[in-house]
């Protein structure tokens, strides 16, 4: 096929399709993105080189394919086979030149492939000039012509297929059966017997077969070299798997496949968790809280960080939902709140999420998140970290941070060890800001010597070649999908979740029509101020507000459950808002009273009780107690719509009947 740089030519760069609009006098061509209508100016010589190199693909239309004589429905030209003719054996090269002589002679004679009589005359002339006593038949030459033109005049299509023919074994099938039986029982086992040991067993089995009359005496001898060739004929992966193990075989035989390498940003998002190697202290009390857990999302094509979430909850659906919210949303306000100078470019939804086999990734909630976002999920095989190498390499780079105080280190014999709990210096909020600075301004600007660019440059250049970022249609749907769910009872007092009452104006219509009963509820595990509940028959979701706004403001679900457990251990009577407030005060006194007396488990418990996550470090301060609660769409009538005027109270006299 041929292409011309004429108006209307369409090319594909990554996922973008560009159409040629006009030429410029200085030798450049102007294309237009068919989706965004943004102009793209390319140099003519560079465009042709990129098409030849395969970096840019020409989009062929049906009319162009028909003009080229294609009869198939495919619009992509098949790739030409690359053959090194200098390395061909003399016999194959002579045969190729012999066939090309007849094929090219017919081409020079301007004869089509279906003119049998004229082709026969050309064959006779060529055979006379070559002094060929047994020239090929007309049908044979016509088959050479069809194959030659079907492969776009590729000379390698005329080579004989017998070159790659597999050789058959010449030994007796019964001898081969004994050889493989010995290999299975003596060599390909976890006993790891040597090849010499297995060969001695083979000779013994062959002698027994000769004595039993199953084999002839001439078939008793099998050389050691032949026996070793049978071993080498088995795949290396199978040899290692049977003698060492599947895990060792996968590690030794792993290779890189072209399809596994993403080619544009947001094609693959790798997500994983890791405990951080530092002890942080509480912002309020100054006491050590232990090691937080980092959940990170990173781009598989450019190694550019997409989102992070730090908490004391450990790996779970809450941390996965937090990192996805952070990765999806624009981060201009977050960067400004952290005082960073470099923009954080990552935003939007990926095409594929690559995760491991943690329980949180196999949960129903995570599958609901992926379904609502329209994102595919790929689960890596167990003990195969190279399937998500970008996030693993990022975790390794965290050890180069210069924060020395409070660092976790391995215990070395005969070396004095500093206790990180007592050496901790940085608060949780400052640690999150420092980690954010490393993620945005340090790591993306480290030079990658393989790609000869930084992750920031690769991501910035890559987003110019792909369509605009895709966002969820509604963050409410995302919160519903990432939230925890349970059927709760709708009673006269509304809905109670772990002892917290919730109310809504939509309860009235549901109760009046259907009565009291169980409804499906969902809530954000990081914020219990609101509760979503589903209409029992219509399927619409409504919002119920907490009736204890002073308690549930910025309260997480895990934090509430731990406070309840702490309250139950100290107060065996009935719960309620007063008991929870007392528990919070007791917890505050508990933090103050155990300075220097807490174990590491107590520190980690205090961090979970504090509800500290990276998402609430940059949040706005909670509303004051005197402020009114938010007005939701579920409220039908607003207070401003009900004007009230105070009239004078009339005088009346009491009477008795």
Image (cartoon, rainbow, N blue to C red):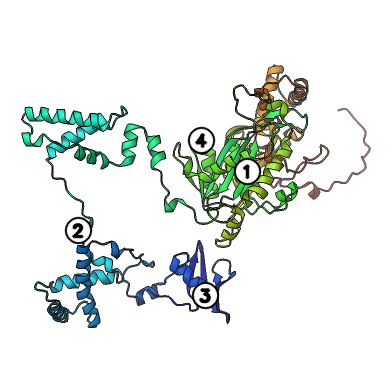
On the image, the x and y values in percent for residue 612 come to 69, 35
Q: Secondary structure at mark 3?
A: helix
What crowding class fits label 2: few (fewer than 14 Cα within 10 Å), some (14-19), or many (20 or more)?
Answer: few
First-in-chain label (1 vs 4): 1
How far apart in space, not on screen, are marks 1 and 3 (Cα)?
42 Å
How far apart in space, not on screen, are marks 1 and 4 (Cα)?
18 Å
Work out which quarter of the rendered image holds the C terminus and state it: top right
Which label sits in the foreground, 2 or 4? 2
Mark 3 and mark 2 residues within 8 Å of each other at the beta carbon: no
Q: Which residue is mark 2?
A: 162
First-in-chain label (3 vs 2): 3
Residue 58's quadrant in the figure?
Answer: bottom left
Q: Which residue is mark 1?
A: 308
Q: Which residue is mark 4?
A: 358
How far apart in space, not on screen, are marks 2 and 1 (Cα)?
58 Å
In the rendered structure, the answer to whether residue 390 lies left or right of residue 334 reads: left
Q: Secondary structure at mark 2?
A: helix
On the image, the x and y values in percent for residue 254 come to 41, 43
Above or below: residue 628 compared with residue 120: above
Residue 2's quadrant in the figure?
Answer: bottom left
First-in-chain label (2 vs 4): 2
In the rendered structure, the answer to whether residue 557 lies left or right of residue 168 reads: right
Mark 3 and mark 4 residues within 8 Å of each other at the beta carbon: no
How far apart in space, not on screen, are marks 3 and 2 (Cα)?
45 Å
Which label sits in the foreground, 2 or 1? 2
First-in-chain label (1 vs 3): 3
Q: Secondary structure at mark 4?
A: loop
In the rendered structure, the answer to whether residue 219 lies left or right of residue 554 reads: left
Q: Which residue is mark 3?
A: 44
Q: Residue at x 16, y 36 (%)?
A: 177
């Amino acid at each position: 096929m041929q292409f011309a740089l004429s108006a209307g030519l369409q090319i594909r760069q990554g996922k973008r399709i560009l159409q040629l609009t006009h030429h410029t006098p200085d030798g450049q061509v102007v294309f237009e993105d068919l989706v965004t209508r943004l102009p793209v100016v390319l140099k003519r010589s560079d465009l042709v080189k990129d098409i030849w190199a395969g970096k840019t693909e020409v989009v062929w239309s049906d009319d162009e394919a028909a003009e080229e004589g294609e009869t198939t429905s495919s619009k992509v030209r098949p790739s030409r086979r690359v053959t090194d003719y200098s390395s061909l054996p003399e016999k194959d090269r002579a045969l190729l030149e012999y066939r090309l002589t007849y094929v090219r002679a017919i081409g020079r004679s301007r004869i089509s492939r279906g003119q049998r009589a004229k082709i026969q005359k050309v064959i006779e002339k060529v055979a006379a000039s070559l002094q060929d006593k047994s020239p090929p038949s007309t049908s044979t030459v016509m088959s050479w012509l069809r194959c030659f033109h079907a492969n776009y005049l590729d000379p390698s299509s005329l080579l004989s297929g017998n070159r790659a023919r597999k050789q058959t074994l010449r030994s007796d099938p019964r001898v081969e059966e004994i050889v493989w039986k010995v290999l299975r029982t003596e060599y390909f086992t976890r006993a790891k017997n040597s090849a010499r040991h297995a060969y001695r067993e083979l000779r013994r089995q062959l002698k027994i077969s000769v004595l039993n009359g199953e084999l002839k005496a001439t078939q008793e001898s099998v050389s050691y070299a032949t026996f070793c060739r049978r071993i080498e004929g088995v795949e290396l992966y199978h040899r290692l798997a049977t003698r060492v193990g599947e895990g060792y075989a996968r590690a030794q035989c792993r290779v890189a496949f072209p399809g596994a390498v993403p080619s544009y940003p947001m094609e693959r998002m790798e997500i994983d968790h890791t405990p951080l190697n530092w002890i942080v202290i509480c912002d309020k009390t100054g006491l050590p809280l232990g090691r937080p857990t980092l959940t990170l999302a990173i781009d598989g094509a450019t190694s550019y960080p997409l989102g992070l979430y730090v908490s004391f909850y450990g790996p779970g659906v809450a941390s996965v939902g937090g990192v996805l919210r952070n990765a999806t949303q624009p981060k201009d306000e977050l960067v400004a709140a952290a005082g960073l100078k470099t923009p954080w470019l990552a935003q939007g939804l990926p095409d594929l999420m690559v995760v491991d086999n943690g329980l949180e990734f196999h949960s129903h909630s995570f599958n609901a998140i992926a379904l609502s976002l329209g994102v595919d999920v790929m689960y890596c095989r167990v003990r195969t970290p190279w399937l998500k190498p970008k996030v693993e390499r990022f975790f390794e780079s965290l050890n180069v941070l210069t924060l020395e105080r409070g660092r976790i280190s391995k215990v070395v014999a005969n070396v004095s060890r500093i206790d990180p709990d007592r050496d901790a210096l940085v608060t949780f909020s400052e640690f999150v800001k420092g980690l954010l600075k490393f993620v945005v301004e340090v790591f993306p600007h480290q030079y990658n010597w393989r790609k000869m660019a930084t992750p920031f440059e690769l991501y910035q250049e890559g987003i110019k070649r792909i369509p605009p970022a895709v966002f969820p249609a509604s963050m409410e749907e995302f919160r519903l999908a990432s939230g925890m769910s349970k059927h709760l009872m709708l009673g006269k007092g509304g809905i109670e979740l772990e002892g917290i009452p919730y109310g809504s104006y939509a309860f009235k219509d549901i109760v009046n029509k259907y009565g009291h009963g169980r409804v499906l509820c969902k809530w954000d595990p990081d914020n219990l101020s609101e509760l979503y509940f589903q209409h029992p028959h219509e399927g619409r979701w409504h919002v119920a507000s907490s009736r204890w706004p002073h308690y549930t403001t910025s309260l997480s679900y895990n934090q509430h459950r731990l406070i309840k457990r702490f309250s139950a251990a100290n107060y065996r009577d009935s719960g309620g808002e007063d008991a929870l407030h007392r528990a919070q005060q007791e917890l505050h006194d508990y933090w103050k009273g155990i300075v220097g007396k807490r174990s590491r488990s107590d520190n980690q418990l205090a961090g979970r009780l504090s509800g500290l996550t990276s998402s609430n470090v940059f949040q706005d301060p909670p509303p004051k107690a005197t402020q009114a609660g938010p007005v939701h769409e579920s409220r039908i009538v607003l207070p401003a719509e009900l004007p009230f005027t105070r009239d004078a109270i009339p005088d009346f006299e009491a009477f008795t009947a």
